[in-house]
C-alpha cells in the first residue's frame, strides 16, 4: 500500500510538472529607449546633486551627457515636438545655471530645473512625475 502511494505521488508530481510547463508563456524583454535610459541616468545624477546641495558639498561640472536629450531616440518618435524641444532647451539652461549658481540661490535654482522636468512631463509622459517630484529640495 505504501509503495502504491509513493508511485501515485511520483506520477502526480510528474504530470503536474508537465502541465505547469505548458502554462509558461514566453517572456518578452522590454527594451528601453535611449531617452528613457538617459532620463534614468539624469534622475540618479540629480539625486546625487540634491544630496550634495543639501549637504553643502561641491557640485562639480555640468554633465555633458545631458545634451543627448536633443538626439536620444524616444520611445515614441512623435513625442519630439516643438514643445519637447523648448522644454528640453529650458531644462539644459536651468541645469547649467545650477552648476554656476551661488550657494545662496542653489536650492531654488535646482528646484527650478526640476520643475522644468515636471512641466515637460505634464504635456506628454505623466508617469515619472511623482518620482521627479522627489528630487525637489523642500
Image (spheres, grey):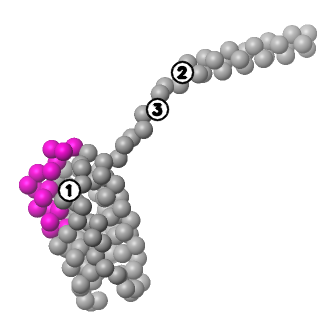
Upstream in the sequence, badge 3 or badge 1? 3
Alpha carbons under labels 2 and 1: distance apart: 42 Å
Q: Tell me, yes or no, whether the two marked residues, 2 and 1, touch with CB atoms within 8 Å.
A: no
On residue 43, the disc is: none
**Secondary element type, mark 3:** loop
Q: In the rendered image, which residue does mark 3 sit on?
A: 27
Q: Are marks 3 and 2 in contact (CB under 8 Å)?
A: no
Which quarter of the rendered picture does the C terminus lie within? bottom left
Q: Nearer the viewer, mark 3 or mark 1?
A: 1
Left or right placement of residue 3 versus residue 133 in this view: right
- Assign the magenta stretch its main secondary structure: helix
Task: Based on the picture, tell me whether residue 80 belongs to the magenta stretch.
Answer: yes
The residue tagged 1 is 71
Kindly report the distance in space between the C-alpha atoms of the residues bearing marks 3 and 1: 30 Å
Residue 25 part of the magenta-drawn span: no
Q: Which span of residues is magenta-colored?
A: 76-91
Residue drawn at x 20%, y 56% is 71
User: In the picture provided, is 12 more to the left or to the right than 69?
Assistant: right
What SS does tag 1 mark? loop
- Residue at label 2? 23
Q: Can residue 130 be seen from the camera position used here? A: no
Amino acid at each position: 500500500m505504501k509503495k502504491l502511494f509513493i508511485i501515485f505521488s511520483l506520477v502526480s508530481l510528474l504530470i503536474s510538472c508537465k502541465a505547469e510547463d505548458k502554462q509558461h508563456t514566453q517572456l518578452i524583454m522590454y527594451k528601453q529607449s535611449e531617452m528613457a535610459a538617459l532620463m534614468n541616468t539624469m534622475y540618479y545624477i540629480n539625486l546625487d546633486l540634491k544630496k550634495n546641495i543639501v549637504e553643502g558639498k561641491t557640485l562639480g561640472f555640468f554633465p555633458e551627457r545631458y545634451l543627448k536629450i536633443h538626439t536620444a531616440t524616444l520611445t515614441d518618435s512623435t513625442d519630439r515636438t516643438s514643445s519637447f524641444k523648448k522644454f528640453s532647451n529650458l531644462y539644459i539652461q536651468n541645469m547649467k545655471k545650477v552648476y554656476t549658481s551661488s550657494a545662496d540661490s542653489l536650492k531654488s535654482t535646482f528646484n527650478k530645473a526640476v520643475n522644468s522636468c515636471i512641466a515637460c512631463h505634464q504635456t506628454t509622459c505623466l508617469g515619472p512625475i511623482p518620482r521627479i517630484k522627489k528630487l525637489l529640495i523642500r
